[in-house]
Image: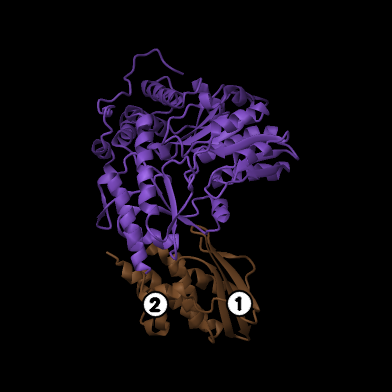
Amino acid sequence: MPELRDLYQEVILEHSKAPRNYKQPATVNQKAEGFNPLCGDHFTVYLDVEGDSIRDIGFQGSGCAISKASASMMTQAVKGKSKAEAKKLFDTFHKLITTGEANGKKEDLGKLAVFSGVSEFPVRVKCATLAWHTLQAAIEGKQDPVSTE
Amino acid sequence: MTTAVKIPTAETESRIHPENAAFDIERIRRDFPILGIDVRGKKLVYLDNAATSQKPRIVTDTITRYYQQENANVHRGVHFLSQLATTEHDHAREAVRNFINAADTKEIVFVRGTTEAINLVAQTYGRSNVGAGDEVLITAMEHHSNIVPWQLLCDEKKAKLRVAPINDDGELLVGELHKMMSPRTKIIALAHVSNALGTVNPIKKIIDCAHSKNIPVLIDGAQAVPHMKVDVQELGADFYTLSGHKMFGPMGIGVLYGKAGLLEKMPPYQGGGDMISSVTFEKTTYNRLPFKFEAGTPDVAGAIGLRAAIDYLNAIGMENIAEYEQELLTYATEKVSEIPGVRLVGTAKEKASVLSFVIEGVHPHDIGTILDQEGIAIRTGHHCAQPIMDRFGIPATARASFAFYNTKEEVDGLANGIKKVQEVFS
């Protein structure tokens, strides 16, 4: 049986209460909106991209503890990374939260590994990935808001 | 239609007749097998009745018996089973008529549920009566199913959708609604009971006012019928809708009640078998009411299951149910609102069986997950009523909704669960 503490880890609760990079960066040249229409979660991810590099990143919006903490920790994890590195990180993260495993790449995830408990709560996977899908849309310059559905 | 042949009736010996003298909650709970199950290692506490209700054994047994012993298509066959299924279907319609006290069974149209019933009215009555510059009047507390069908209609007809406001307690501003009734208002559509807030609207007063201005009124009764006695003639409703699955019947069956005079004048909704009298390639004449609005093979098992649910409710008595639930809601309101950091959303004076709340610093989605670990099923989110959430400036609420099989012990479990949520987030 899944334990609540596996999902609501201290780090996650802390980030949900005090999200990092919860702002629009001074320079924003790419951004995207993401919705989860089932629960009403709604985030905007802002990027300051220079060439291939994510120079700065911020987010704003409303959502549950899981979605907000995931967005917060995502911004920390991808800041300064290349677009391709961010995409690879999302793939590994997605693997972790859907299966609990990361194919031996768990160390690549760093602090993001605290989300492994989400795999025991399948209905919450969309919460944890909302910001990441939105980041992906921002990188790809998609105009339409992304939806988890 | 009906047959002179003597056929077995649907009466079953196992139909439940609780004593009227006492509201025997233990006995009632035993009629609902699902209430005895464990989820996540805990005893199920089912508080999501506004989403769908659980089914008493008599409903599931009736459906099983229908498919095992009575199944055939209706209105078509001369054979024994077809006549039997047709008679049972007719009995179900009569049971609904009696339950909401309609004047005639021809005013009872079987549909899939309230959503389809409202779409039917919007697409038939609406499309024939609403034109450019006309108005459709709804309220700020409607479910999406009583907003979007009217938006579709208004978009098509270049008509205007007007929305009567509510106050901070979630009560309809009836005076404002009355003022918004104009010569251009072609129909008013509103909920009897709000699914997200639990507010009971004073619909008789509203209908009387609308009728004084010759405006017909559709009442979305999905959240009212499971909780109180409804008499469509006394209310004077022109249209009244209900969903079987919210009143302890099966999913996939619902009812549109409409005054015969209005239904007669409305064009058909869908075309097909059963809704016609005769068809040639040049001209089709439509069947009489209510069959004009029932194209195709109907959900016979659903209708018969709904009848079983109605018989069950009648045996307990809607007045008894309303009384018991009011006491339960009052208890729950006290228990939950006394917890520091919890705020109720929807505090109308007249309410039915819904307790929507938010917890300071905790998103409703997280409340739902943590309560689920305690075996407590509630709904979290916008409850298909996003405009209400916007009205209260919140993205979502947690909603506990009760039925007559819920208990004060379960409410205590909810209160303890809420405290556990606060511990996790402390």
Horizontal relation, residue B147 to residue B20: left or right: right
Q: How is the image coloured?
A: by chain
User: Could you tell me which secondary element the residue under label 2 belongs to?
Assistant: helix
What type is the residue that disc 2 sits on?
A: Val
In the rendered view, would you say B8 is above or below B328?
Answer: above
Q: Which mark is residue A11?
A: 2
Q: What percent of the width, then of the height, locates residue B109? A: 51, 29
* Nearer to us in this view, A103 or B389: B389
Q: Which chain is purple?
A: B
Q: Which colour denotes chain A? A: brown
User: Could you tell me which secondary element the residue under label 1 belongs to?
Assistant: loop
* Nearer to us in this view, A141 or B283: A141
| Residue named by callout 1 | A24
Q: What percent of the width, then of the height, locates residue B130? A: 70, 36
Q: How many marks?
A: 2
Q: Chain of mark 2?
A: A
Horizontal relation, residue B258 to residue B329: left or right: right
